[in-house]
Amino acid sequence: MQRSARKRRYVAVVLAFAVATWWCFSDYGRPPTVRFAQLERHMNTGQPPVAAVESSFDWSGISFRYHPGDLEPLPAGKASDIPPIQYQFKRESHADAAIREARLREVRRVFQDDWQAYRRHAWMKDALKPVSGGYTDQFSGWAATLVDTLDTLWIMGLKDEFNEAVNAAAGIDFGQSTSPRVNTFETNIRYLGGLLAAYDLSKRDAVLTKAVELGNLLYSGFNTENRMPVDFMDFERAKSGKGLEVEFRVVSASPGTLSLEMTRLSQLTGEPKYYDAISKVTDVFYRGQNQTKIPGLWPVYVSMRNQDVVSGDQFTLGGSADSLYEYLPKMHALLGGREPRYEMMARGFLETAKQTLLFRPMLPGGEFILIAGGAQVLDDGNIVQDEESEHLACYLGGIYAIAGKMFRNPEYIEIGAKLTLGCVYTYRAFPTGIGPERWNMVACRPDEECAWDQERFVTATKQHREWKPHLPLGFTTAKDPRYLLRPEAIESVFIMYRVTGNPAYMDLGWDMFAAITNGTRTALGTHASVRDVTKALPELPQEDYMEASPVRIHHTLGITNVGI
């Protein structure tokens, strides 16, 4: 989502860029069950017991003003026959293994440098400032980097570091906040998501205990008259149980990005209230999906106070809406297909998006790639395409690929590949090897072969004051030239590799990793955002900000045989 950069995890950067590459480069030659069993034994045996410290406020003891009524249970019955998503890898050669393992060691080294920088300079704080060595507590002060990195530490087999982090997480006090207003979306994806991932891997009871505490905190955000969640929670009023007021207008990703974590918490605890809460939200989006101005898609802005998800006229698959769409096929998988709404909603948006929001850009080399743009619906009903895209939309290639496997639709996998290569193109086109945050291109006209048209391109550049002469041909802007250490592009590269088994994706991922780590390294030995990736300078200008996800994904890109 826009304001948070979907997963703008201000956490030790390449903490996730590494995991993608790590998964991709790890123990390719052994069966997945063998590799995972070895890692599980290493990480989960001989551990001293850790007791969770109770938070200073019991969120489960609130007497709500607005009661939920009868709770909807988790869907029961036989799971659907969902096909395996991952390609069946064959044993690799010794030469390929040597290359992969060397890359994997480098990814792990980068991750450990970033983790140690966080540990030295910002331990138990939300985020390290990677240039100054300071810290920020912008996510309520509950150690966002630490919680968000628990699963990465486990996946990389860093047993001592994981144990230390679990001990620290077990003492987080969710009864206190550094901010009087708690962001529901951010708290869910960073904290609850991080704790649940760590528990699923490690089975540490203390981690689940803290996840339940946090789940109860988030559940208090549904204490509203219509049982829709608030976007920002008044922390002290939420404790009182007096009820909260739903905001009039929010971005659609905010209420639409609670389902996976709350559902998983119900699955792990047997407590239906978490699933019941998000199911009511799903009902609103499900009922409105085919009543919007672009049926199949939801507008960027919605009103959960009025339960209106149909009136808006701006549409995108990128920031502000992204994770609403991302979660739909994943919910279908998580529930084993037992709840048909998620498949119907996923199919609906995938079909509509390919017809209205995806476009082939005109390029001097004639490459057939796809880019996710936006659209606005005019008063007369005409749809105006927006040729602007952004890094946040780069998750979409992986989502099409996953949906293609689950729904047995090869066309979706092909679309996913073209979308993924579209985002990779934005990296490779610039001299730094890194893609910008936002950019514009010229869409090919429907039903044309899309040969390069220099005159048309020049005309298009004149319509954008952000165009600069040094931009590569094909780009009419790099509207936001920053690189914010985002994971979406490498995430799709990782998924395409796991879905297709095509080793070219490993090489693409490695090139991205090398460019990012070289271009973002700071004097502290960690990594920071870059202000302008469009110019090759001896030292790229940096911002005192970092992101968590990319290293995790680069790491996972290297463990090719762990099933998904």
Image: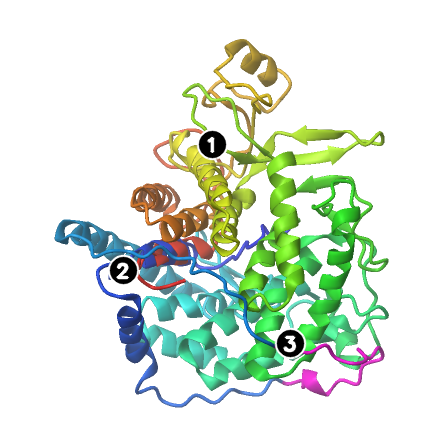
Q: Which mark is residue 144?
A: none
Pointers 3 and 2 in contact (C-beta within 8 Å): no
Point out the stretch of residues depicted in magenta. Answer: 56-76
- 1 or 3: mark nearer the eye: 3
Pointers 2 and 1 in contact (C-beta within 8 Å): no
Q: Which mark is residue 74?
A: 3
Is residue 498 rendered magenta in the image? Answer: no
Q: Earlier in the sequence, mark 1 or mark 3?
A: 3
Give 276 or 110, whichever is nearer the viewer: 276
Label 1 sits on residue? 369
Graded by Cα atoms within 10 Å as few (under 14), some (14 to 19) or many (20 or more), the crowding at tag 2 reads many
Image height check: is 74 above or below 354? below
Seen at 70% across and 60% down, the residue is 255
Coloration of the structure image: rainbow
- 3 or 2: mark nearer the eye: 3
Is residue 65 rendered magenta in the image? Answer: yes
Identify the amino acid type marked 2: Ser
Farthest left residue?
94
Give 147 or 356, whichever is nearer the viewer: 356
Distance, label 2 to label 1, CA atoms, is 29 Å
Label 2 sits on residue? 26
Q: Position of residue 305 (x, y in %)?
A: 84, 60
Distance, label 1 to label 3, CA atoms, is 40 Å
Identify the amino acid type marked 1: Ile
Q: Position of residue 99 (x, y in %)?
A: 19, 50
Q: Earlier in the sequence, mark 2 or mark 1?
A: 2
